[in-house]
Every structure is written in structure tokens, then in C-alpha cells.
Amino acid sequence: MEQVRPRLFVSRCLGFAKCRWNGEVINDDFVSKLEPMADIVHECPEMAIGLGCPRDPVRVVRDGDRYELLQPATGNTYGAIMERWAEDYLSELEKSSEPLDGFILKSRSPSCGFKDVKVYDSLRSDSGSKPGTGIFGAAVLRHYPDTPIEDEGRLRNFTIREHFLGAVWTLARFRSARQKASMKALVDFHASHKYFLLLHNQKEMRFLGTIVANHEKLPLPDVFQRYEQGLRRALARPPRYTSLINVIQHAFGGFSDSLSKEERALFANLVEQYRDERIPASALLLLVKSWAVRFGEAYLLQQVLFEPYPLSLVEITDSGKGRSY
């Protein structure tokens, strides 16, 4: 499998600098493992707009029909400044010849958070709050609606982490194919990702196949553009566990007649164990891959389904929340 390096934005406080409001840095194990394998862009929005470190904390508050960034200790507001900076900063990132493949934002941060940020009901210090987004996080969602975006807290969930890593590495491989600027590169990409795309979205996988066929004889840049749009739609959501069962059974069908009765029974038993959440997907994938090796199934062995991202990033630990799909 081609070795690629995803290009990611990561909140600077997640291991890159002491820029938290209290002057600390968060040493996140996942980000530390990811750093040598990816090209990382990092920034701290709060320091970028001139807030020092350490600093009095800020909070997101609802001010009429807009959101404000309030520093309760001083009464200063920074919402407009943060919004202008975020728009300028993200616009510059979008102009880069190397687009971002994903974002890892600081969870619940009033600037970077994109989920579960406390949004206070008013400027009053005793107001209640509801979950929402941070000022910079909201801008990221607007500018990058089809790009994988997560925070370090959610990435402790095994399913979310698997989906994020698979998506960003797939987008990085697509960037590599696009840079080769040939139809063969796109055909090869689609062929090697067929089962992975089938796992995520069967409808989009088939649509992407029609784009690759290019019956309309579109110019190559247009073909890549249309393919990227469909690819991002296909990767938008984690696949359901039933989708993996369907894909595995599809792959299994290619050599099931060559297996013994006992081997077929073993496969059926493991499928049921996976369905009941007693074994991980990797157990099924490894078994099917071993049979693909045994029977010399070259097409199956080239599928990124078996290793959508580097094995060194595989972690079986989980936050304990279980399946999120």
C-alpha cells in the first residue's frame, strides 16, 4: 500500500505549546503517535487574537442572534475579533496547494470546540448554558463541511477513531493520486478502495464507479473534482457494523467453495460473534485476508479495507461508550 502523510490541523494546546488559559499544555497520547506520520498545522486561536498565556478564561455566550466570546473577569468581548481572524486564517489555509485532510480540535474549548461547548444563555454571570460550538470551531465547520473533524475527547472512542483515521488516510491517498494527474492513477485508486467504499456507502461507491468510467469524456481535472465530491460524501459517516458483515461476506464468497466445511463453519461463527460485539472487526478481516493469501486473491489483497491506515496507529482501547453507530 502506498505510504502517504495526511495533512492535519491540530489545536496547538494538544502537545505543541503551553498555550492553555492556565499556561499548561495537554500531552495527548493519540496526537503524539500521529505526529510522526502526518504533516501537522497547529494554531491557538485565543493567542492568535492577542490573548496572553496564562490568561483569564473566556466563554461563549448567546448575545441576541449571535454568539459572543466573553472574558468574565474583565468584561471584555472578543467574538468579532475571533470571527474575523478565523475567517482570514481559514481562507488562507484553503488557498494552500496542499489541502487539509482533517482537523483535531480541543474538546469543549470556547474557541476550538465543535461539539458540546458550553454556550451560556446571556452575558449575565449566573446564566445557564446549552451545548454548542466554539467560535473557531463553528468557522471550521463552515469552511470544511466535508472534511473529517474530530476532537481529542471523541477520538478516545474506538469507532470514531477508526472512522477518522480511515477517512483522513483515504483523502491523503486521493491527493497523491490527483497529483499524478492521470486517469490510470484514479482507476487504480478506485480499484484498491472498492471494498472500503462499499463498506461506507454502497450507493456512492457505485456512483464513483460511473465517474471513473467517464462516459461523458470529461476533462481529467473535472473527473477528479467530481470524484472527490463523491468520495467525501461516502466517507462522511462511520459505517454500520452490518455493512462490514456484508462486505466481509462478499469477499468471503470469492473463495468459500475452496474452504472446508469446518472453515466455513468457523467463519459463520465469527460473524455471529462480531455481530454480538464479542470480537473486533479485525478478527474477521485477518481471517479473510489469510484466506486471500492462501488462495492468491491478488485483487482482494490490494484492498485498503485490510489496512486503511498504518497498523502502528491501531489501538484497541476505548472510552467505554461502545458502538456509536
Image: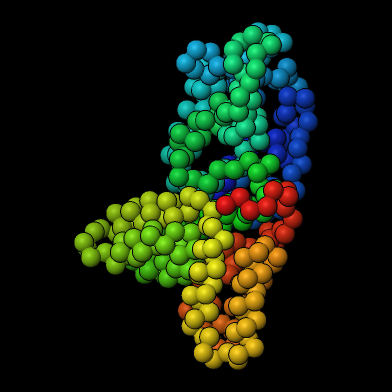
Q: Residue furthest left?
A: 216
Quadrant in the picture for residue 52: top right
Residue 32 visible: no
Residue 183, picture quadrant: bottom left
Q: Specify whether residue 87 is in view.
A: yes
Task: State the residue in front, 235 or 97.
Answer: 235
Q: Nearer the viewer, residue 36 or 137?
A: 137
Q: How many marks?
A: 0
**Residue at position x 58%, y 70% in the image:** 306
Quadrant in which residue 25 is drawn: top right
Q: Residue at x 47, y 79 (%)?
A: 299
Above or below for 97 versus 62: below
Q: How is the image coloured?
A: rainbow
> Could you tell me residue 205's position as x and y percent?
40, 62
Q: Quadrant of the N terminus?
A: bottom right
Please give the name of the residue rendered at 45% of the width and 40% of the height, measured from the top-left corner: 145
Q: Residue at x 61, y 50 (%)?
A: 324
Quick check: 80 left or right of 181? Answer: right
Q: Is residue 195 depicted above or below 146 in this figure? A: below
Percent of width and height locating residue 247: 50, 70
Can you give x and y, in whole percent of width and height, for residue 43 in the image? 62, 34
Where is residue 269? Give x, y as percent: 65, 76
* 259, 40: nearer the viewer: 259
